[in-house]
Image (spheres, grey):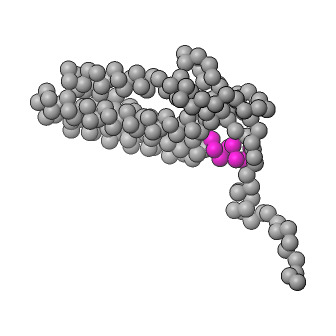
Amino acid sequence: MRFPELLRTTVILCGAAATLLAVVTVAGAAGAGDSLLVPLCALWWLAAAVFGAMLGRRSSTSHQISVLLSSARTQMSLPEINPGRVVLNRLWPILVGTLAAGAVAFAEPQVPGIAAGFALGGALVLRRQGAAVTAIEERDGARFYVEHNSPLRPIRLIRTPGFRSNLTELAQGRQTRPFAGRRA
């Protein structure tokens, strides 16, 4: 699986987890008759959204992702591509955390409310990272793939050759037209 696609999948999964946990929080608070919990959670969600939007507003990669890209192992052939296995292998903590927080919703409805804020903030922090990695791929003429390894080990990337894009040169007007002479 390409690394930018994993980043986009992470954003979507975090957003879905935040939505699910928010719904479960509201249902758990309504079942417990707690009228103060939902407004407090809504304030936490707003604070997490603002903080996540501020941290994720840069269009360049974060330091951690740039270190991961620079340490990618170069390989001339495409690696084995199995997106389902990579997503499950890399994003299992989000799934387990969502299920664990949602499981206690009717006993302790504040737990999924807090977890929803963290999932929302995480989605907003990562929202532009996939596009930043894609821009690096286009600039360098390479593709980054997630290497299959243990779910408990740090993520590793494989760098393969790709096609270099000249969109930047076209946008800046540096490309010369091959037949710029007189017309016959």
Q: Exactly how many numbered labels are in the figure?
A: 0
For image coordinates 76% across by 32% down, the residue present is: 77
Residue 78 position (above or below residue 184): above
Is there any visible trace of residue 121 in the rendered image?
no
Left or right, 67 with respect to 97, comes to right
Does residue 139 sit above or below 161 in this rendering? below
Q: Which of 34 and 82 is in front in this view?
A: 82
Residue for point 47% across, 23% down: 92
Q: In this view, does 11 lie above or below 152?
A: below
Quick one: 81 or 101, which is closer to the camera?
A: 81
Q: Is residue 33 visible?
A: yes
Q: Which region shows up in magenta?
A: 133-140
**86 or 182, nearer to the observer:** 86
Give the left or right position of residue 120, taking residue 164 as reference.
Answer: left
Q: In which quarter of the image is the N terminus?
A: top right
Judge whether residue 47 is colored magenta: no
**Direction bottom: furthest residue:** 184
